[in-house]
Image (cartoon, grey):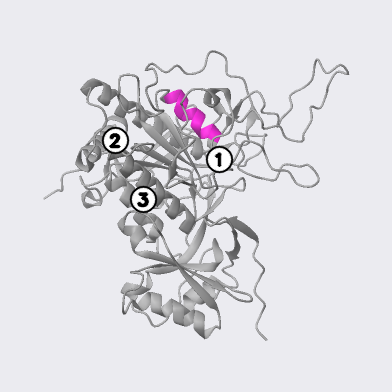
């Protein structure tokens, strides 16, 4: 009698508005027909991602996946990613239905017998987790209410006709925060700092529907009243950091994470594909769209293959498509204190120190055709790398990420109460989860990434101001400008091959 499959441990939001069951791969229980060790990972229980050409004859991988589903008596649906970009046009997800569905077993069966060159085109739909540092109040990590003395960041350039254009007609740097959304806060409730109405053909850019734009505005609660462990406030905190570093930037929330901080690889790739379409239309002058200058990603997953530290997937492809259009992509390194590959961060080229700059370990890893992924670790106030920060040769730089001061939604008040309170309520001790004051101290690589993103945005804007010619409207100009900003801010450059 076969051992029963473990029940899905949780569910994750689907782009279609439903919920997908999630399993955790247990190396002690997982068997692999192809051999090789496996590592723990989370994946969607009923979906595979296949990189191929939908409808093409003799696509052996898609055919093998369908055949495996049919042998198991499973009904299936092929979903094509309807988005711009080579990666999205050549990918489908195979959603299956049936009792005790397990995509891991289906994947193993589907690629057994497929040649090595093709089998890598099929994979699990990994579940990414937001890079939230969850260490408690006893040390840096958990968010703590805080004050921010002084006025809010000041925009030098007055607003123009739209939220992403100045009164002089110059394109503001647009920073897309692909996260939990941006909640309510005085910095963001008035004016045009946040582009809240961005859509593609009437639909939101991210996974969540238009009626749920501010994912971290109010913390969810259990029936007993406690806050569900979540990423509430994560996107708002990131937004506040960018706004402090580059007040003249326009912030574009792309809500892909729920308060549980989870998103599937497939749905994240779809949302990034829609963001790419929004960008291309904006650069082309389509109304109610704008070009995007910087994207911030603060989430990741560990691949199941221990031997393969160069996992290829649809997410990697769409990130490359963005960069080919001159969009800078900044990724947080993660908060596990490890040097093990975590993706998408580990897709960045390996670098080595070169004086006060960094250079690629292999010059052929970088190209003038598009900028690389930029991966940021978290630095302590004294400049050392934080002990929780992931590190590795793909981490290109570090920025302040410990006890950072930024914004949280003013609606965020948890169930805890002050330890002491005067009867008349006029005096009390600190309420450790009352963020209605709007500010907090928080630590994590998630909050180092927007520091670099803000620096890049500020550099791009300064160059636009100096040139006085608006926003580049062609791909090559955007790529060249992006590379100039990387060299100016971070020092990374395309090294000349040695002979």
Give the mark toward the camera: 2 or 3: 3
Q: Earlier in the sequence, mark 1 or mark 3?
A: 1
Callout 2: SS: helix
User: What are the residue bounds of the magenta stretch?
Assistant: 236-245
Residue 455: image x %, image y %?
37, 29
Of 477 and 130, which appears nearest the observer? 477
- Pinpoint residue 339: horizontal percent, then vertical percent: 45, 50
For mark 3, what is the residue?
319
Query: Residue at horizontal 49%, vertical 32%?
Result: 239
Give me the disc on residue 284. none
Say if 469 sits above or below 386 in the image. above
Query: Residue visible at 43% across and 25% down?
Result: 245
The vertical placement of 375 against 85, above or below, is: above
> x, y (%) of residue 102?
57, 72
Magenta stretch: residue 241 in it? yes
Calculate the distance from the C-alpha at mark 2 to the C-alpha at mark 1. Answer: 31 Å
103, above or below 476, in the image: below
For disc 2, the marked residue is: 486
Whether label 2 touches label 3, CB < 8 Å: no
Question: Which of the two labelled residues, at mark 2 and mark 1, occupies the earlier sequence position?
Answer: 1
Give the Cα separation between the discs numbered 2 and 3. Answer: 17 Å
- Mark 3 crowd level (few <14, some 14–19, many ≥20, 10 Å Cα): many
Q: Nearer the viewer, mark 2 or mark 1?
A: 1
- Foreground mark, 1 or 3? 1
Q: Mark 1 — residue?
A: 213
The Cα–Cα distance between marks 1 and 3, rounded to whole angstroms, is 23 Å
Position of the N terminus, as image quadrant, is bottom right
Q: In this view, which residue lies farthest toward the left?
A: 499
Q: Is residue 394 visible?
A: no
Crowding around mark 2 (Cα neighbors within 10 Å: few <14, some 14 to 19, many 20+) is many
């Amino acid at each position: 009698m076969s051992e029963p499959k473990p029940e899905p441990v949780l569910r994750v939001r689907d782009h279609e508005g439903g919920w997908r069951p999630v399993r955790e791969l247990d190396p002690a229980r997982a068997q692999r027909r192809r051999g090789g060790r496996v590592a723990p990972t989370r994946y969607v229980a009923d979906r595979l991602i296949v990189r191929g050409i939908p409808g093409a004859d003799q696509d052996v991988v898609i055919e093998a996946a369908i055949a495996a589903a049919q042998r198991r008596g499973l009904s299936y649906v092929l979903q094509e990613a309807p988005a711009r970009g080579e990666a999205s046009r050549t990918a489908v997800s195979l959603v299956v239905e049936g009792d005790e569905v397990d995509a891991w077993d289906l994947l193993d069966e589907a690629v057994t017998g497929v040649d090595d060159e093709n089998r890598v085109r099929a994979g699990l739909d990994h579940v990414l987790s937001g890079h939230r540092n969850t260490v408690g109040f006893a040390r840096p990590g958990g968010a703590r209410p805080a004050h921010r003395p002084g006025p809010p960041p000041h925009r030098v350039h007055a607003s123009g006709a739209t939220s992403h254009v100045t009164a002089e007609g110059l394109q503001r740097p647009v920073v897309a925060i692909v996260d939990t959304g941006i909640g309510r806060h005085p910095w963001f409730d008035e004016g045009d700092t946040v582009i809240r109405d961005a859509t593609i053909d009437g639909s939101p850019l991210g996974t969540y529907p238009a009626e749920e734009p501010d994912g971290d505005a109010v913390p969810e609660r259990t029936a007993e009243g406690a806050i569900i462990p979540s990423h509430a406030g994560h996107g708002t905190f990131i937004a506040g950091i960018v706004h402090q570093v580059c007040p003249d930037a326009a912030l574009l929330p792309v809500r892909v994470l729920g308060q549980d901080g989870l998103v599937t690889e497939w749905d994240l790739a779809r949302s990034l594909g829609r963001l790419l379409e929004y960008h291309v239309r904006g650069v082309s002058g389509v109304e109610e769209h704008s070009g995007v200058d910087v994207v911030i990603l603060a989430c990741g997953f560990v691949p199941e293959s221990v031997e393969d530290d160069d996992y290829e997937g649809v997410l990697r492809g769409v990130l490359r498509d963005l960069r080919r259009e001159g969009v800078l992509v900044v990724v947080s390194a993660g908060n596990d204190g490890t040097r093990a590959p975590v993706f998408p961060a580990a897709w960045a080229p390996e670098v080595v120190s070169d004086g006060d700059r960094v250079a690629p370990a292999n010059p052929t890893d970088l190209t003038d055709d598009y900028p690389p992924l930029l991966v940021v670790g978290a630095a302590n106030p004294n400049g050392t790398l934080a002990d929780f920060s992931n590190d590795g040769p793909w981490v290109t730089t570090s920025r302040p990420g410990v006890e950072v001061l930024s914004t949280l939604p003013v609606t965020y008040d948890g169930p805890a109460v002050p330890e002491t309170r005067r009867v008349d309520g006029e005096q009390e001790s600190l309420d450790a989860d009352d963020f209605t004051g709007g500010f907090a101290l928080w630590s994590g690589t998630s909050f180092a990434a927007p520091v670099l993103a803000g620096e890049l945005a500020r550099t791009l804007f300064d160059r636009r101001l100096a040139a006085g010619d608006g926003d580049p409207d062609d791909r090559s100009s955007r790529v060249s400008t992006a590379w100039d900003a990387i060299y100016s801010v971070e020092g990374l450059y395309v090294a000349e091959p040695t002979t």
